[in-house]
Image (cartoon, rainbow, N blue to C red):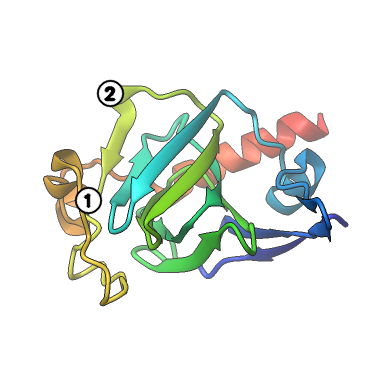
Amino acid sequence: MSMDVTEMQVPDAFVFTPRQHPDDRGVFLEYFKREVLAQAVGHPLSLAQANCSVSSRGTLRGVHFAQVPPGQAKYVTCVTGAGLDVVVDLRVGSPTFGHWDSVVLDDTGRRAVYVAEGLGHAFLALSDQATLLYLCSEGYAPGREHGVHPLDGDLGITWPDDVVPLLSPKDAAAPTLAQAEEAGLLPTYAGCRRLYAAMSERVSS
């Protein structure tokens, strides 16, 4: 296999570590393999949009998610610099609701993270500049995009002490997890499981 796959502590999120092939010219790797992801997730990624973000040190993007259905799955990698990538279970009714896990994405290990529909995603730039590439299952739709405040104390994400987070006005005004749940903004675990099952059934039929 061209990469190793591990599931994160948040179910339905995976880390893909590619096998790198260095020589005197540089390095070559396959950072995305459709069949490898499909085997791990149960269905392939239906690519609708590819995004690129360039962030200065301390930039904190997230915690972002999209309404389900259709939601938006993401496959994220860092091609220059480094950052802390965080996945949060925002699915009401999930056994791990409110739990989070993180992994460092950088241009050395060149790992990628898959974030299933219904999960929240955030990224904190740790280097002077960090460039992320996102493969997305659905295009951007402002009316379906939401966020949870990444510094919500009840959420309790452990951000590095030596980095001062810089949030956009939109992210700084995002509700806490409890406020988002009370407002009915969060996806449900049952709804996400139905969506995952339907996508897997389409592959097998």
Spot the residue most to the front: 24
Q: Is residue 57 visible?
A: yes
Q: Quarter of the image containing the C terminus?
A: top right
- Amino acid type indicated by mark 1: Glu
Q: Residue furthest right?
A: 1
Judging by the rendered image, the residue that carries numbered circle 1 is: 181
The image quarter in which residue 154 lies: bottom left
Above-or-below relation of 69 to 93: above
Q: At numbered mark 2, what does the secondary structure look like: helix, strand or loop?
A: helix
Judged from the image, the secondary structure of the residue bearing numbered disc 1 is: helix
Question: Left or right of 108: which side holds 69?
Answer: left
The reply, left or right, for residue 67 in relation to residue 74 is left
Tell me which residue sits at (32%, 57%) in the image. Answer: 57
State the residue at coordinates (47%, 23%).
Answer: 139
The three-letter code of the residue at mark 2 reads Gly
Residue shown at 13% from the left, 41% from the top: 169
Q: What is the x, y in percent for residue 76? A: 54, 46
Looking at this view, is 200 or 123 the one in front? 123
In the rendered view, would you say 169 is above or below 114? above
Measured in 3D between alpha carbons, the distance from the residue under mark 1 to the one under mark 2, in whole angstroms, is 17 Å
Which residue sits at x=40%, y=60%?
127
Q: Position of residue 49 (x, y in %)?
A: 53, 25
Q: Quadrant of residue 86?
A: bottom left
**Residue 76 in the figure: left or right of residue 89:** right
Whether residue 187 is visible to the viewer of this picture, yes or no, is no
Q: Which residue is mark 2?
A: 143
Number of the label disc, if any, that sits on residue 115: none
Mark 1 or 2: in front is 2
Task: Please report whichever mark, 1 or 2, sits nearer to the chain's N-terminal start.
Answer: 2
Task: Rate crowding at label 1 as few (under 14), some (14 to 19) or many (20 or more) other CA atoms within 10 Å.
Answer: some
Pick the front one: 124 or 57: 57
Circle 2: is it few (<14), some (14-19), or many (20+) Cα within 10 Å?
Answer: few
